[in-house]
Image (cartoon, grey):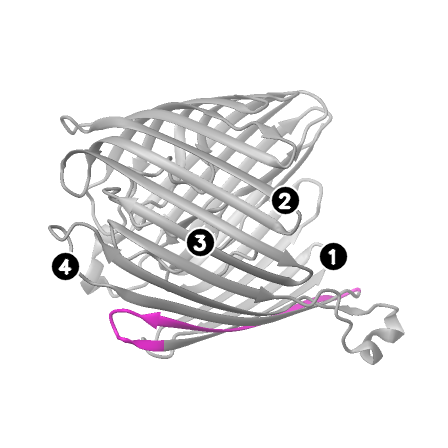
Amino acid sequence: MTAILAFSLSYGGILWYADSIKSLNDLKMTLYPHPSLEMYLHLRDYRPYAPASIHGDTYRLGVFRFFARYTRGDMSLSLGDEPLTFGRGLSLFLADDEKALLEGTLRGLHLSRSWMRLYGGLKRRWIYYSSDNDTMLLAGATLTPSLGDVSLGLNVGAYNLYGRDGASGMIAGSYASGKFGPVSIYAEGALRDGYDLFTYGRNLGYALYGNLEISRGSIVLGTELKDYYRIGQEFNLPAPGNGYGLLPSDGRDEWGANLYFSYGTLNLELARAYSHDMDHLMDYYALSYYTDWRRFTPKIGAHLLDWSENLNERRAFLEIKYNAPLGIIAYAEYRTRYLKGVGDWESQPYASLSLIYGGITLSLSYRRYMITGKTDRVAEFSYDNFRFLRLFVSWGEFSGDIVCSSGVCRYEPPFSGLKLGLNLYFVL
């Protein structure tokens, strides 16, 4: 069960909160023409989807999160749990195990002004398959200036794993991105000097990532390159643009390449005859095909057996939106993903339907994993009066997958059962 209670107080501002059943970081979008004060409380309880005989009671855990934030102009001061975001996430999560991290937040003090940010506090590593959780003391600073179409970033921090002798170190990272006509370029690097959770010793590790994307109209062609060394983590980086092809890394010390292509037809008018009476046209969305190729090669045979492999994913989807008094959003997707442990391709069809009337939304979704036999079924009802209240109830089963937020991808664990949410927000 998930219970969410949010209280917000704002003077002359506009507040909006939204929660998604698969979201790791709650989406909060705020416009503040005047000073404001926010308070937020979040409770979440994860339940096992797999049989209890495999995971037992240690698979179940609860997460508590809160914050209070004061905003005045471009200055923000907050105390509590705030998400840490920087670039694609390389420098902030070097000391984490990707599949063990459920909450990418730092509990402490956060001070931001314009393109500068100072932070310090505690970061908990929630290991959902074990009771051996770690607490990290983390402090640092982030600079993210922009020069026209070019954005730069620098992050420096120090950490210590509480209760582990010698488990401390430094992490640093930087990124640069720019758009020059149809060409978009992104590059990021991270460096860590400190404790390695994989070898239980100190060493120097780095992670490099680069992306080049060319777009023309509805066509997007891109490539990604990476080089990881002694990082102690499996990074899952999305293809920029549409953000598809979220294939996890299988190696700790590896290089890799990723090619992707997508095509979308915008503003496609369909079923004109069915919508003419209500003076509405059925909007589109897109028909897209995505293919992914990667090869991984380990660099340190002492920790992993030598292997190299192509991992592939292909994805095609169609989404149709119908704007009438009763809004309809229909989405269908056909994905094939290569399973390393099985050595074969698995088809993963997916479909969802959402009905929207005023502030009431009813959503149904279904995904079938043809080889493993798993099935995801989720039904969600939400009500939003757009003034002070949002309520949602969801029920179903989710078998776990990679979920991305703010350009950073993490593993969302399986769940089975009921989720309840209530947001209360006030504007004075």
Mark toward the start of the polypeptide (3 vs 4): 3
Q: Give whichever of discs 4 and 1 has the lower sequence position.
A: 4
Judging from the image, what secondary structure is the residue with disc 2 in?
A: strand
Q: Is residue 176 above or below residue 303?
A: above
* Viewer-nearest residue: 237 or 371: 237
Which region shows up in magenta? 325-345
Q: Which residue is mark 2?
A: 180
Which mark is drawn over residue 224? 3
Callout 4 secondary element: loop
Q: CA distance from mark 3 to mark 1?
A: 42 Å
Q: Nearer the viewer, mark 4 or mark 1?
A: 4
Secondary element at tag 1 = loop
Residue at mark 1: 358
Tag 3 and tag 2, C-beta contact below 8 Å: no
Q: Are marks 3 and 4 in contact (CB under 8 Å)?
A: no
- Marks 4 and 1, how far apart in space? 57 Å
Q: Main secondary structure of the magenta part?
A: strand
Residue 66 x %, y %: 45, 32
- Residues tagged 2 and 1 counted as in contact (Cβ below 8 A): no
